[in-house]
Image (spheres, helix red, strand yellow):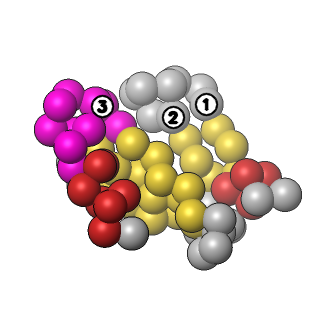
Amino acid sequence: PGYVREKVAEWLEAGTVAVWVVDPIKRTITLHDTRGTVPLAESDTLRGGELLPGFELPVREVFA
């Protein structure tokens, strides 16, 4: 987990707009961008926001 956090920070510092981290053990997706971090559980929906307008994917489908 520490390595992943470091890489996310590096990517955002380098100009990456957003990073989605999928955790297959916890069955979560964590969204990282310049505004902060948003954890999503299986009951949530992953949305593309301004980056991918119209994109929606229920988190549970990632782990189906």
Is disc 2 surrounded by few (<14), some (14 to 19) or many (20+) residues within 10 Å? few
| Precedes in sequence: disc 3 or disc 2 | 3
Q: Where is residue 18 in the image (x, y as percent from the top left)?
A: 35, 37
* Point 42% across, 52% down: residue: 31
Q: Which residue lies furthest to the right in this view?
A: 64
* Point 45% across, 34% down: residue: 49
* Point 64% across, 38% down: residue: 56
Residue 10 belongs to magenta span? yes
Q: Do the residues labelled 2 and 1 touch (CB within 8 Å)?
A: yes
Give the Cα distance between marks 3 and 1. Answer: 16 Å
Mark number for residue 55?
A: 1
Under mark 1, the amino acid is: Phe
Question: Mark 3, mark 2: which one is toward the viewer?
Answer: 3
Residue 56 belongs to magenta span? no
Under mark 2, the amino acid is: Gly
- Residue located beneath label 3 in the image: 17
Q: Position of residue 45 (x, y in %)?
A: 62, 52
Q: Give the range drawn in magenta.
A: 9-18
Q: Is disc 3 placed on a helix, strand or loop?
A: loop
Check the image and report above or below for 48 versus 22.
above
Q: How many marks can you see?
A: 3
Q: Position of residue 1 (x, y in %)?
A: 39, 69
Give the Cα distance between marks 2 and 1. Answer: 5 Å
Question: Mark 3, mark 1: which one is toward the viewer?
Answer: 3
| Precedes in sequence: disc 3 or disc 1 | 3
Is disc 3 surrounded by few (<14), some (14 to 19) or many (20+) residues within 10 Å? few
Under mark 3, the amino acid is: Val
| Precedes in sequence: disc 2 or disc 1 | 2
